[in-house]
Amino acid sequence: MAGTGCIVQINEDVKNMEGLSTEKDHWIVQINEDLKNMEGLSTEKDHWNKGSIYKLPASLTDTNKKAYKPQTVSFGPYHYDPSHPMEAHKHRALLHFLKRCGKSVELFVDALAEVENDLKDSYTLLHSVPKEVADIFLQMMILDGCFMLEIMRTAAHVLDDYAPNDPIFSDHGRVHVVPFIKRDMLMLENQLPMLVLEKLVAVEHDKAKDAGFVTKLIVKFLFSRNVSVNMGKCVHVLDLYRKSLLQHEPDPKYIRHKIRSMEQEEEIIWSATELNEAGIRFKKSATTSLKDITFARGLLRLPVVVVDDTTESLFLNLMAFERFHVGAGNEVTSYLLFMDNIIDNARDVALLHSKGIILNGLGSDKAVANLFNSLSKDVILDPDSSLQIVHKRVYHYCKKPWNEWRANLIHTYFRNPWAIISFIAAVFLFVFTIGQTGYSIYPYYYPRGDSSPSEVIVVPVPPPPHHSSSDCTSPSALVISFVLASIVCMFTN
């Protein structure tokens, strides 16, 4: 019986080995087949260019899920929920849209069907959504696209076919709902391809609108200030918003080859307060572009930035887009890293706020400092960034002996009013003691009976004059006064 069991075991082991060999052979065949069908470089490049709306990894979103997940309305398949109350409002928006333009829904379906593959390719992980969501992809694009157009037109006061008490498309909705929809429209996972909006507008107006019509509509919706619409091709709303923040070319003197030519060393830039102590002045840039940061002759110019409840989510999604979309650039990430370097605490925020650079909508300077410090975690500065030259110039300016000594002096003696008062008192006491000592010595060399200080009279050298205990003009008083002043400074620092 034991021998039979051994034979059975050996046969099973042989079968397992044959199975492993078969799996290995199948894998080799598969690799060779894939190698034959491997795409060319140009085809591979086109493939990576198609994606622009990314499903972010949990390692990124787990730190702040609310910043990446829409709270009021979803656009696209990643966060689609048919039971969400806003889906009913999307349906109403489509009906108003169709009735106003007088076109059948079939025309819009046919127009988007022509570019369906391109729209699907925009979502890098469309295969990860449930099948029932993927099956209604075109329906979702039309509903979401029309809803987004109606929201933007509501904000622009160009619609008059909704009831005045409509919860979304009215003055009430413009105040209480639209701001939260705007926030959700600037989340990377919640984007619609720009092609959807362009196709819907083209069918609505029989292609009568120019190519920049949609861009102008979005800019008017997102910004209250004047923003140029000449941004080139934008893949979605978040991309357009990012480009609007960067509408400024750096000064030609901050060019890449100069960055590479400068000495390579570990350089840590000081905080805004320390830079100010070293003699660096802060001033608002001429534009609001995040690229408009320059340093020359001790003057650091920074663009104005508004910090409010939406700032964290906005910057996190912009950085995520720069991280995952190859070729987008890294200007926003570089700006936030630079701000993190010069902001350490509430005093730095207060200094920049006093210069009009930071407009604090959070109320607390400490909250703003914590915000900038948290945004740049696990982020690396691109060595080819245009801000790298500014970083280096500021660093080398601070390392000059005079500027470094000046910063240490101010940091030690002028950080609070009591230290300033004690320092001034010590200097005054020191100067006063020297003057008083000199005044007491002067009669010894020039007695009052001398008619002229220039006449030389040879007299025996008298013994040193005797001073009473109440006379504080002896040289020892100088030392005592200086020691006392030093003690005062020590206790007030």
Image (spheres, grey):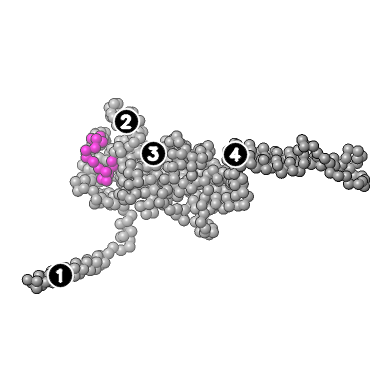
Task: Reply yes or no: does residue 230 show up in magenta.
Answer: no
Say whether marks 1 and 4 touch (CB < 8 Å).
no
Q: CA gap, disc 4 to disc 3?
A: 42 Å
* Residue 79 picture location, percent across and down: 27, 43
According to the picture, the residue beneath numbered tag 1 turns out to be: 13
Q: Is residue 202 visible?
A: no
Question: In this figure, which residue is indicated by the disc labeled 4?
Answer: 492
- In the picture of the structure, the residue carrying the numbered disc 2 is 173
Q: Which residues are magenta?
A: 74-89
As helix, strand or loop, the secondary structure at mark 1 comes to: helix
Instruction: From this view, report whether residue 14 is shown above or below residue 93.
Output: below
Viewer-proximal residue among 70 and 202: 70
Marks 4 and 3 in Cβ contact (< 8 Å):
no
User: Please, which residue is most extreme toward the top here?
Assistant: 164
Badge 1 amino acid: Asp
Q: CA distance from mark 2 to mark 1?
A: 71 Å
Q: Residue at x 30, y 60 (%)?
A: 43
Does the magenta segment cover residue 84?
A: yes
Q: Amino acid at mark 3?
A: Thr
Residue matched to label 3: 310
Q: Earlier in the sequence, mark 1 or mark 4?
A: 1
